[in-house]
Amino acid sequence: MALRRKWANTIIFAILLVGAAFMIAPLLWMFTTSVKDRMDVFALPPVWIPNPMHFEKYKEIWDKGPLLSGIKNSAIVAVTVTVVGTLTSSLAAFAFAKLRFPGKNAVFLLLISSLMIPYPSIMIPQFMMFSKMGWVDTLLPLIIPGLFGNVVMIFFLRQYLASVPNALIEAAKIDGSSYLGIYARIVFPLIQPAVAAQLILWFMTIWNDYLAPIIYLNSPEKQTLQLVIANYNATYAIQTDYPLIMAASVIALLPMLIVFVAFQKQIIESVAISGVKG
Amino acid sequence: MTTKSKLYRKEAYWGYLFIAPPVIGFLVFALFPAVYSIYGSFTDWDGLGQMSFIGLDNFKEIFQDELFHKAMYNTVFMMLAIPVGIVLALLLALGLNRRIPGTTAFRAIYYIPVISSIAAISIMWNLAYNGDFGLVNQFLDLFGIKGPNWLQNVHTVKPAIMIMMVWKGLGYTMLLYLAALQSVPKDYYEAAELDGANAFSRFRHITWPMVKPVTFFVVVTNIIGGSQLFIEINIMTSTGGPEYSSASVVFYVWQKAFGNLQMGYASAMSVILGLFIFIVTLVQFKLDRSSEVNE
């Protein structure tokens, strides 16, 4: 029995290894293509690992288009939205979980129901609204809605707060703490791990967003990173400069990869929770 | 008494203040546009000033619009990737749930495509599917198979995008399954083993029912996500593919709204999409309820 299990585990390990290769190979290929000589891309038989590696493209990409401003714009949007939005979301979660006021649950359900509205169904009026305000081709339409909070984050923080004893908050109230004080001194420190995980996930979503930016941003120097690299793809494919395109895409991928490696545990845990709870 | 009600009023005041931002955000940026979409779908809105009521004309036209039918068919077709992804993810999770070295590393590797920018990933696969020097055909060539020019071929463009969708989403589904599997009490299996249940019946009678909520969650979220497929299509087949064979509903809505400025017509299509998602969510709630009652 033990031997059979050992064999089975070996075979499963091998399968998982092959699977992992399939997951990672396209990304590795993406990288090796970015360090290939332009002609090596077309070489037959294929060149898997170029020798020598050409890292010139990683220098060139910065002059070939607004890559730097793309990174800057993406960072402005993602940082502003997640920092302010996390504050508003966590305050709302605190109120929904721990404060007593009439209509609380009905309002919460109303907010949750907004998850059923897909972005494509509201993007046209939203676009017209922002275009009336003269915000087209600015980052504002990507920033402003997020400042008001994120329903998913509110949902999870509220859930998390359910495990915080009410007595803790009652005691602070009796001590004469203000509600903002209770939030800042008691609630926020307690929910910090959950806040961090949700913030990272939200940051990634915004960083990788594409549909909203493509609707609003026209001028190259106003575009977010994802749009910039899509334009590299459209422009330089005609010149068959594939190493350049891949280098720019690797740059677009890298920040989230670093974030993932750094916060792997928190990300994986909070995603796993979302499924169990959902 | 008065002090208590004063305290209570103060609490309510702060409560409303704290929930005000998301509520305002919801009203202004979600509910209002949603209602306006519905209104716009009954007009010939062109985004430039014209907006007259035309009744159900948009919807009548949509039902005869061949491109819409195609986009709808393509979207539904590509959602067939969902069950494939679910089966693969569950198998992987079952493998990872055993005592095997490197579980953490595997988990992270399978998850990398999930966190990767979908634009960058689409650009990469766009090149990988190139008929002459793409990774996919170079790989197939090792086995002596001559692959097609994936994205330029009516028959292969949809499967190509589906493979990519499975590749991108696998890690996420796998992670959810793994979390569910780890919460199954070990003694269930021990008891079943003592009763002489073989591996398959252990899976059928213990594992499958225990992970059912996750399967349900994944199916619903994938249908909602899949029906909004856009980025991959926009980057990999910027014209909607050969003979419009990879265009999705959202791609068509986007083209009509922001390319042709047929805002009313596009709104009508987006309302149909919204209704579809509403129904899927409703079915989820219903089924969720009934499964709870059964247990």
Image: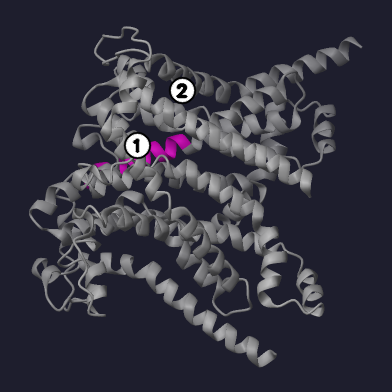
Secondary structure mostly seen in the magenta stretch: helix
Residue at which label 1 appears: B249
At 42% from the left and 25% from the top, the residue drawn is B271
Left or right? Give the position of A39 relative to B141. left
Q: What range is drawn magenta here? A: A67-81
Report if residue A78 lies within the magenta region.
Answer: yes
> Between A18 and A164, which is closer to the camera in this rendering?
A18
* Amino acid type, residue under disc 2 in the picture: Phe
Q: Can residue A163 be seen in this view?
A: no
> Between A147 and A40, which is closer to the camera in this rendering?
A40
At 51% from the left and 23% from the top, the residue drawn is B25
Which percent across, then down, holds residue B156?
A: 26, 57
Q: Can residue A131 be seen in this view?
A: yes
Left or right? Give the position of A176 relative to B171. right
In the rendered image, the residue lying farthest to the front is B64
In the rendered image, the residue lying farthest to the bottom is A3
Task: Please give the label number shown on residue B29.
Answer: 2
Report if residue A231 lies within the magenta region.
Answer: no
> Between A10 and A162, which is closer to the camera in this rendering?
A10
Dot 2: chain letter: B
In the rendered image, the residue lying farthest to the right is B1
Give a yes or no on whether discs 1 and 2 share a subunit: yes
Which percent across, then down, holds residue B45?
A: 30, 14
Q: Establish if A10 lies above or below B266.
A: below
Name the image quarter holding residue B153: bottom left
